[in-house]
Image (tube, grey):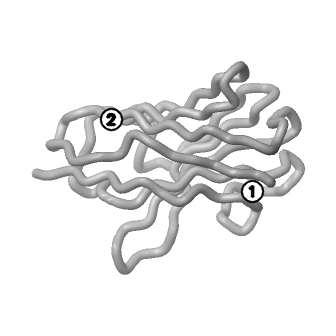
Amino acid sequence: QVQLVESGGGLVQAGDSLRLSCTVSGRTLSGYAMGWFRQAPGKERDFVAGVFWSSGGTYYADSVKGRFTISRDNAKNTVTLQMTSLKPEDTAVYYCATKPRFSLGWGSQAFDYWGQGTQVTVSS
């Protein structure tokens, strides 16, 4: 059974940094990609960042480029989202997810397993 467990959320002030982690069990990630999404109250779940596990290729939403960095740790089967220069509009529940690398695009429908989410709140 594939399980994803996120950690690292919390309450921070604008301009602060925060690091989210997601550990995957039950799936060998070569041949897959990992993604981070976020969902604010009353809004849709949006793509934030993604990484192809084997190649390390990364992709970002325009809203986070230059501020967020996604990385992977092969030994720990863990993907990390380093968030800097946080803004109040980054407040959301953040989810990690995994998809087969041949599943096209970075929309949520391409991903087959999801974590439970972790809350990030950025105060102004």
Query: Which residue reaches farthest bottom?
Result: 42
Name the residue located 81 percent from the left edge and 28 percent from the top edge.
54
Q: Position of residue 98 (x, y in %)?
A: 72, 50
Find residue 25 and name its label: none
Residue 118 located left or right of residue 16: right
* Label whose residue precedes the other's in the sequence (1 or 2): 2
Residue at mark 1 to residue at mark 2: CA–CA distance: 27 Å
The quarter holding residue 1 reads bottom right
In the rendered view, tell whether residue 12 sits above or below residue 120: above
In the rendered view, tell whether residue 92 sits above or below residue 109: above
Q: Amino acid at mark 1?
A: Gly
In the rendered view, tell whether residue 48 sits above or below residue 65: below
In the rendered view, tell whether residue 75 sits above or below residue 28: above
Residue named by callout 1: 105
The quarter holding residue 9 reads top left
Residue named by callout 2: 18
Residue 52 located left or right of residue 70: right
